[in-house]
Image: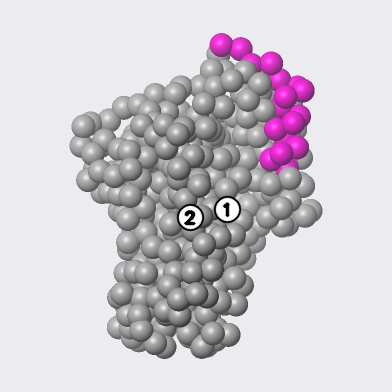
Amino acid sequence: MTSGTATDRSAWGVFLVFLRLGLTSFGGPVAHLGYFRTEFVERRRWLSERSYADIVALAQFLPGPASSQVGMALGLTRGGYAGAFAAWVGFTLPSAIALILFALGVARHGDMISTGALHGLKVVAVAVVAQAVWGMARHLCPDATRRVMMVLAAAGVLLLPTVWAQVGVIMVAGAAGLILFQPTAATTTDALPLTVRRRTGLFWLALFVILLVGLPLLAQAVPDATLARVDAFYRAGSLVFGGGHVVLPLLQAEVVPNGWVDNDTFLAGYGATQAVPGPLFTFAAFLGASMSTAPSGWVGGLVALLAVFAPSFLLIAGALPFWERLRVLPKAQAALMGVNAAVVGILLAALYDPVWSSAIHSIADLGLALLALMALMRWKLPPWAVVLGCALAGWALSRLG
């Protein structure tokens, strides 16, 4: 399933679509997956529900920021390497610029941003994720067996709230799918239009490993500040499972003890990152711009940003050709039927914690979330309009309170 105009398929068209998402996608990585599904599965019909879920499942297995990796994969299938780069730039640019400006002191009055508006952005994430869970459950859990797997996956992740528990749940669900399901022709998925060959994929995977092993050795051998920072941010982007929040301790251990950024500045930047749309990994841009020694400012921010996201590009470009070939095999499809049910369960668990638990604190919050959900599902309003409306409503409610 691929549709859209020729402009849609160009790198520029991909950039514009992801730029709008980068400006409006508040709520963290789980909410981002909801925005992507609405935009690319329902609205633009770039790919089917099952193909989208397969890409999400792959991103769950790989280290790094899952939502950004899904975006890169979508760009790669739409416009090749240029499309992958355009998707990443569009989705990342707004928050990266905002955080570099914040680091440079341009946003000195950031405390004037209404806490009510920020809370409204958390509330709208509840509606976005709920819509995604509902839509994916309808398509990917159509029978009682997969619904039970979905609920068990959600329960398992909630009982053991660790990243390794998520990976374990997916693996168990895949094994269960091999036993329980027998795919038919009706379950055959549509092929993704990939231009990356498996031999090229091996090159990208090898380059990922070479850089992961070689950069620390090179940084020790060559005492250069830029090289040391590229090594630190590349390793952080390579070794983190679970997204932006999990990268916090790794980055803190790299930049604070080394004296690159003091702890107060680190925490202030992390707080600011929660107030901007787009991927949480753009926190690296703030850190790079805040460095006490050169490179800092715009150059430092760009170096850190490219280094922390480079592993994601290498892993997606390397793994997707093998994933595309693997997922069409009957046994792999049976496993993916279980994996996709587990992915929906993981999103269901995330809907409760942290999305719901961090946003819904009163009847007014619940009412606003339900109103946002109606706006998305019944009235079919564009997500950016619902995001803006909830921010304004949150601000108004805070003034009334």
Residue 286 numbered mark, or none:
none
Q: Position of residue 361 (x, y in %)?
A: 62, 66
At label 2, counting other C-alpha atoms closer than 10 Å, the crowd grade (few under 14, some 14-19, many 20 or more) is many
Q: Is residue 128 visible?
A: no
Q: Please, is residue 75 above or below residue 388 in the view? A: above
Residue range corresponding to the magenta coloring: 169-185
Kind of residue indicated by mark 2? Pro
At label 1, counting other C-alpha atoms closer than 10 Å, the crowd grade (few under 14, some 14-19, many 20 or more) is some
- Closer to the chain start, of discs 1 and 2, is 1
* Residue 191 placement, left or right of 53: left
> Mark 2 highlights which residue?
311
* Residue 52 placement, left or right of 173: left
Q: Position of residue 368 (x, y in %)?
A: 50, 57
Q: Circle 2 sits in a helix, a strand or a loop, which is it?
A: helix
Q: Position of residue 322 (x, y in %)?
A: 52, 32
Dominant secondary structure of the magenta stretch? helix
**Residue displayed at 54% across by 53% down:** 209
**Residue displayed at 49% across by 69% down:** 218
Contact (Cβ within 8 Å) of mark 1 with mark 2: yes
* Of residues 268 and 114, the one drawn nearer to the viewer in this rendering: 268
> Mark 1 highlights which residue?
63
